[in-house]
Amino acid sequence: MIENFENIESLINKIKEDKKTKNITQKRFPVRYIFLSNFETLKKLVSEIKKIGIEIFEISQLLPKDDGWISTQEFIEKIKSLNSKKDYLLLPFSEIARFYNKQDFNNLFSQLTELENVSNTNQRLYIPLLGIKDRFNKEFYQNFNRRIEYSFTWEINEAINRAKVFLYNDILTDVGSIQTVKGTKEWLNLWKKDLSSPTLCLSKTLYFLSDNAKPDEIFEFVKITNIKELISNVFDLEIPIEYKDSEKEFWNKLIQQLNKKKYTSFFNLVKEITNVSKINVNNFLELWLTTNRNEFEKWLLKEQLLSHECINDAYLCRVLSNLESFDDSELLKELWLHIFSINNPSTKIFEDRFNLLKKFYSIKVLILPQETTTSLKQKIESIKERTNRLKYITGILEFEKELIIKDFSQKEDVTILNKYPELLEYIDDFDFENLKQEQNWVFNYFKAYKFAKLKNEYTKNIATQINELNKNEETFFKWYYSFDEVGEFINENYDYVFWIDALGVEWVSLAENILKRKKYNIERKLIARVNLPSITEKNRYENTQYIQDFDKFIHNNNYQYPESIIGEIEKLKNIFDKIVIEKNKKAIIISDHGLSALVRLNDSSKQFPKAEHEGRYVNTETSSSFQSDINYIVKDNYIIASRHISLSTKPTREVHGGCTPEEVLVPIIVFNSIENYQTETYQINLLTNELDIKEPVLKVNISPIPSKKAYAFVNSARIELIKQDNNQFLCKLPVKRAGEQKLKIIIGNYEREFTINIKSGFRENELF
């Protein structure tokens, strides 16, 4: 039976008495077990034991290495080898015994308890036991036959002081805020330290053996399987992130941060490390793509968003959940491709994807790997149904722009161009304040030209118009000389004069929109003719900033449909991005000629051996000997192509030098950077939104009454609004079909768009 004592003093007295005992059995067996309930009592016992000449034997010296272990048999043999003439206190015995399994535990105590003194020795081996009393009783003492023969189990009655121990098996983990033991040797010395606060045990050996140590009266063992659990237990902080071994590096960095400072929430930790105060789906890409943002910070941003800010199954959250890398290019790739793994994506999903991609490229320009681009293209093209296929197209990548152009060329559905806004601006209506009524054909012609270019087809419409305009020399020169020369518009004093080589009228609407996006004020848009032949040598301007990039791009590249259209738009965007004027300055843009993409679609009818600019003109000493021809005109010593047919071989590029409107007509744009510049504004009200197709008379009120002419644009036609009484203006619209149509009213540089409904004039009779 266990003999109880009130304190250490009474136990020491018992030790002294026991040493003097005459009881044969007690003298024969040297082992005495001392049950204690806390380590402070153990420390006091050690101190008192030393005073009465008992040696302290630390079991840690028996271990082969820092995180080594010893079998029960080795343990017994080591104890047997102790000097039989000395008494020993073995400690901390229970700190190794508790980790043996049931069989080893019983064998250890059975063999120790049955050790016998040799010869006439009266040795004592005192073994303090803490926290394993219940296990000692159940697994050994109750089955030990001689337990009633003599007293060898003693106990000091006292309150139990429990200590928490976290067991984790990564010795490299550095948790500075908690008492840590890294191996079994340190564990066996733990009794010497303060155990009032939790301890972290990183011994791989004890982690493996820890299931044997339960239950325990003193130690509360908490076995931790990963760093997330470690942080939760040690730092009392819940991290809303699923633990993955592949992200262990990040978790270790979390611990490093937690060693420095205590945080009340995961979000507070994320805010401090990433230096942000707000994280949501709207600002996530800016935060992620911030310069020098490391992978650890991206990991935190991602997990914070996924755990707290993701609502309604947002596309960004779907993408991040599927993201396995923190490389920017991988995020971009997933933004592009993840949509194809979603069944029946909603309109909101498509919108989110487009806006995210647009924002990504506005912050950082990355080139997608070719295999990603190829995969994306294949996925889009595999969708047979047009309406559904168009949903996946954003218009950001070049191949998408190619698909948009080809789709538009087949359907002439302007809605697709909303995904390619620069192309929509390219085909947009335009106006010139110096355009005369008899020159209104310009609108229909350039609309037909642009559509033919986008179709890559020499259309009947454009052929009919050019054959009428340039029917012969007389008809050509009539319209040609009706326009003023470029030189007549550059006599004013401008702070900047930009000469953009090869900028024809076809590009004026795009150029105007780019300048407006740059916050410049458009003062005037004018149209002018260039000298013949329409080449740079005949149209040079002094004291200008000469920009030749566009012309070089055309001449240095064979035309490829539709790639060349996209390349031209991008080249002009780059050129206009570089056009910068100081505040409160005035500038003008001029050009020396335009270009034609349609000549390359027709076989040549002539074979002039000395034709220049890919057959657009011939320079001869005299042109008097040449007869008139429907395909060219003669001017001075030049034979100049008047239609979309080369005078030699079929061109491989866009060309200039000839007499087509796109070659000889150029825009003149006057703009400024004046702050608070007062542009013309008008109050325009339609007196009716519905017009009868039989009599489509548009009536509007314009206030104040403009000093410039007002025009209505519909279906590429420009119609002057005629002033009536008071503020009322009217015109008859050239509409031929019923339904909703876009209408634009332009007064100088002021323009406003409306939607009108054209009624067919028919009404169905009721059948019943």
Image (cartoon, rainbow, N blue to C red):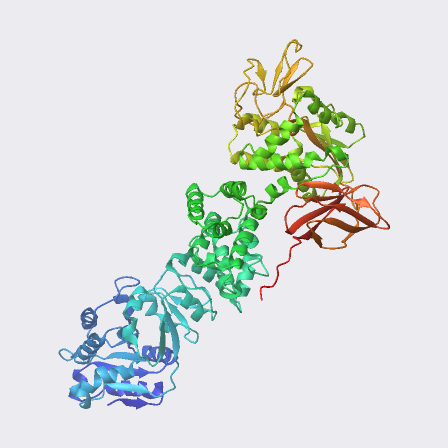
> Where residue 500 sits: x, y (%)?
67, 30
Query: Which quadrant of the rendered structure holds the N terminus?
Result: bottom left
> Where residue 64 sits: x, y (%)?
25, 62
Q: Report the side of 506 relative to 93 (left or right).
A: right
The residue under the point 27% across, 64% down is: 68
Q: Report the side of 191 relative to 113 (left or right).
A: right
Q: Report the side of 70 relative to 704 (left or right).
A: left
> Where residue 458 sits: x, y (%)?
55, 32
Q: How many marks?
A: 0
Q: Quadrant of residue 85?
A: bottom left
**Near-viewer residue (239 or 617):** 617
**Near-viewer residue (556 or 234):** 556
Q: Is residue 252 above or below residue 676?
A: below
Query: Which quadrant of the rendered structure holds the C terminus?
Result: bottom right
> Where residue 358 sits: x, y (%)?
56, 49
Q: Quadrant of residue 101?
A: bottom left
Can the viewer see residue 21 in this picture? yes
The residue under the point 67% across, 44% down is: 517
Q: Is residue 598 above or below residue 139?
A: above
Q: Residue furthest left?
A: 119
Can the viewer see residue 82 in this picture? no
Q: Report the side of 84 relative to 471 (left or right).
A: left
Q: Residue furthest right?
A: 726
**Near-viewer residue (569 or 116):** 569
